[in-house]
Amino acid sequence: MDSRWRKSELPSSASQYLQVKSHYVISNGSVEFTPATFTLVGIPGLEAEHIWISIPFCLMYIIIFIGNGIILHIIRIDPVLHQPMYFLLAMLALVELGVCASTVPTVLGIFLFGIHDFHCWLASHGIDFNTCLAQMYLIHTFCIIESALLVAMAFDRYVAICIPLRYTTILTTTMVIKMGLGSMTRATLMVLPCPLLIKRLPYYTKNVINHTYCEHMAVVKLASANTLINRAYGISVALSVMVLDLGLIATSYIKILQAVFQLSSQNARSKALGTCAAHVCTILVSYTPALFSFLTHRIGKKVPPSVHIIFASLYLLVPPTVNPLVYGVKTKQIRDQVIGLFFPNKKISEN
């Protein structure tokens, strides 16, 4: 920063730059501003209830870390579970842990401890601008990876039910690894432009984020410039992921239903559909709150901001909370291992 610049020489629209503790740099003859910090305020209008809101959030975080940790442990120690379906489930558990680890510092800091200001998550001077962008990048990247893994799991069920004789030749360990790497690559490349485009925006007077974490649109709205490109790119990424992934999942299950209803035995049909139950529950739990949050954010103009923020927080936390419970109940192999883990002397049912 050139110390020869004086406040009187800055653009008039930046007259309050000291209030937001912005850094400014000279680029191509113009002054560009980025905030030194952002301030997260949680849920506006419900500040007095934050301590009570923290209770269900704490419970969800505990279930998430314990539940997904148990899933990973069971899949690791049991050779019987070293199959494509469970490898994909392990990847999903890791991604869900990543989502939660990315949000814990700010969400619980605000709700549980009443801390609204973070500096690199450790001090009390606002969340650092680059740290905020890193949190935003990680959260959205993990969410897109999660969506891709649900597609991969739908493909796994399609192969297992529609072409079972080729299951072991199609879904090899190498193929599962490729699907995982493909999911990571797609998410990384799709989300990367978001923080880069935000870095181009000036922030003159606003640095207060009405949210519990650094969400893309919440950060973009604070910019003191035209954000059409940022908004257009954000909505195009969200729509392309939802339309493509839901389309592929729907296609897989249409094929699965066609194959199932061609089976002559009622018992065989029930067994085939039963293997999909946990995955279907995961799809509903993952996409329903996400779609609701997405639609209300774009077209629900009369929906209070507090509702937007609560649903935006819940759609990140509900799937990781519910998924271990669903797979623990619906998947016999995992259920038996969980029972054996906590009750080693209990006889496991054969049913």
Image (tube, rainbow, N blue to C red):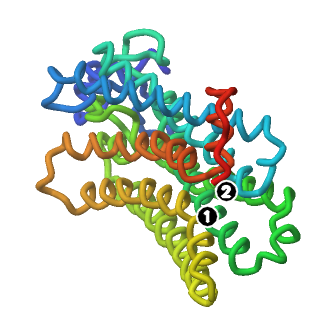
Which residue is outermost to the top? 123
Secondary structure of the residue carrying tag 1 is: loop
Tell me where residue 210 appears, x and y as whole percent. Answer: 26, 34
Residue 6, relative to residue 269: is it above or below? above
Residue 57, relative to residue 198: is it above or below? above
Secondary structure of the residue carrying tag 2 is: helix
Q: Residue at x 66, y 74 (%)?
A: 158
Tell me where residue 288 appears, x and y as whole percent. Answer: 37, 59
Q: Is residue 185 left or right of residue 296?
A: right
Q: Residues within 10 Å of mark 2 (few under 14, many from 20)?
A: many
Residue highlighted by disc 2? 183
Q: Residues within 10 Å of mark 1 (few under 14, many from 20)?
A: some
- Residue 298 appears in which quarter of the rendering? bottom left
Q: Is residue 36 visible from the viewing direction of this image?
A: no
Residue highlighted by disc 1? 275
**Foreground label between 2 and 1:** 1
Q: Is residue 197 visible from the viewing direction of this image?
A: yes
In front: 255, or 224?
Answer: 255
Amino acid, disc 1: Thr
Amino acid, disc 2: Ser
In front: 344, or 54?
Answer: 344
In front: 331, or 199?
Answer: 331
Q: Residue at x 40, y 36 (%)?
A: 214
Which label's residue is closer to the chain start, 2 or 1? Answer: 2
Q: CA distance from mark 2 to mark 1?
A: 23 Å
